[in-house]
Image (cartoon, rainbow, N blue to C red):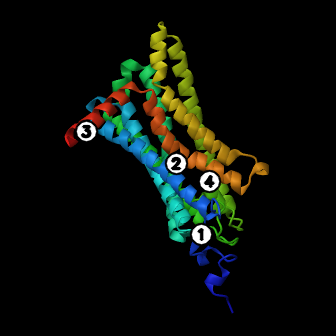
Amino acid sequence: MRAPCAQRQQMSNSSCITQFLLLAFTDTRELQLLHFWLFLGIYLAALLGNGLIITTIACDQHLHTPMYFFLLNLSLLDLGCISTIVPKSMANSLWDTRAISYQGCTAQVLTFAFLVGAEYSLLTVMSYDRYVAICKPLHYGTLLGSKACVHMAAAAWATGFLYALLHTANTFSLPLCKGNAVDQFFCEIPQILKLSCSDTYFREAGLIVVNVCLGFGCFVFIVVSYVQILRAVLRIPSEQGRHKAFATCLPHLAVVSLFLSTVMIAYLKPPSISSPSLDLVVSVLYSVVPPAVNPLIYSMRNQELKVALNKLIQSFFCQQQ
C-alpha cells in the first residue's frame, strides 16, 4: 500500500511536493528579527532610489532620451528583482517559518529568471547606446530613434521571458526525489536541480550551456563596445572632453561590473569552497545588493539626473505648502 503523499514528501517525486523549505539565515529569534529589519531597510532603499529615478525620468522632458529611457527600464527590472525575493524572505523571518508553496516557488523562479535575463540583455543594449553616442554621435538620432529604442527594450524583455520560460519548464518537469529543502533563501534553479535524481537533469545542463554561450556573446559585445569607446575617447584632443565623454559611460560600466562579478562569484566559484553559509552570502550579493546600489551609482555622477531630481523634489514640496 502506498504511503500518503504528505508522509513521503522528503523522498518522493515532485508530484507529491506541495511546498519547499527555504534556507533560514538563522534559527535565533533575535537574529531573525535583525535579518527582517536589515532586509526591510535595503528593500525600502531600493524602492526609494529606483522609484525616484523612474518618476524623474518620466516627468522631466529633458530626460526623454535613449540613455534615460533604458535607465528607466533598468530601474523597473531592479524593482522587480528585489520585490520577487526579498518580501518573502522578510515574511519568513518575521513569522519564523521556512515554507514556500510549490506554486509560489515556481512563480518566484520564473519571475526572477525573467528579470535577471532581461536585465543582462538590457545592459548589453545600453552598451550599444554608449557606443553610438561616443563613436557615432552624428548618427545617434538615426540609429537610436524612439522606435528603435522601444524595439531594443522590448527585445531585452522578450529575451528574459524566453530564458525564464525555458529554464522554469525544464526545472519543474524533472522528478524531485531528494526532499523539498532548498539550500537557499529563495527558490533558485541550481538549488532545486540538486533535489532531482533523474538523468533528465542533462536536459537542463544542456540548456544552461546554450545560455552560457549566449551570455558570453553578450559579454563579448559589451567588451568590444567599450574597447571602441575607449579608442574614440583617447582620440578626443581636450582632456575635459575626454573626461566628459567617459563620465557618461562610467555609471553603466560600474553597474555591468557589479552585475557580472556577483553573478560569476555565485555560479562559477569552485565546488570545493561551496557551503550553505557562503552560498547564502553570495546570493545576497548578486540578488539583493545590485538593485539597491544601482540608483546610487547612476545618480552620484550624473549632473542632469541630479538637477531633474532636485526640481522634482522642490516642486513636490512647493505643492505641499
Does the residue at mark 4 contact the one at mark 3 (Cβ under 8 Å)?
no
Report the Cα–Cα distance between label 1 and label 2.
22 Å
Amino acid carrying mark 2 in the image: Val
Q: Classify mark 3: helix, strand or loop.
A: helix
Numbered label attached to residue 207: 4
Q: Is residue 246 left or right of residue 220?
A: left
Question: Which of the two labelled residues, at mark 3 and mark 2, occupies the earlier sequence position?
Answer: 2
Does the residue at mark 3 contact the one at mark 1 (Cβ under 8 Å)?
no
Q: Mark 2 sits on what residue?
A: 116
Amino acid carrying mark 1 in the image: Phe
Amino acid carrying mark 4 in the image: Leu
Q: Is residue 274 visible?
A: yes
Query: Disc 2 vs disc 4: which is toward the camera?
Result: 2
Q: Residues within 10 Å of mark 2 (few under 14, many from 20)?
A: many
Outermost residue toward the right? 272
Q: Residues within 10 Å of mark 3 (few under 14, many from 20)?
A: few
Does the residue at mark 1 contact the one at mark 2 (Cβ under 8 Å)?
no
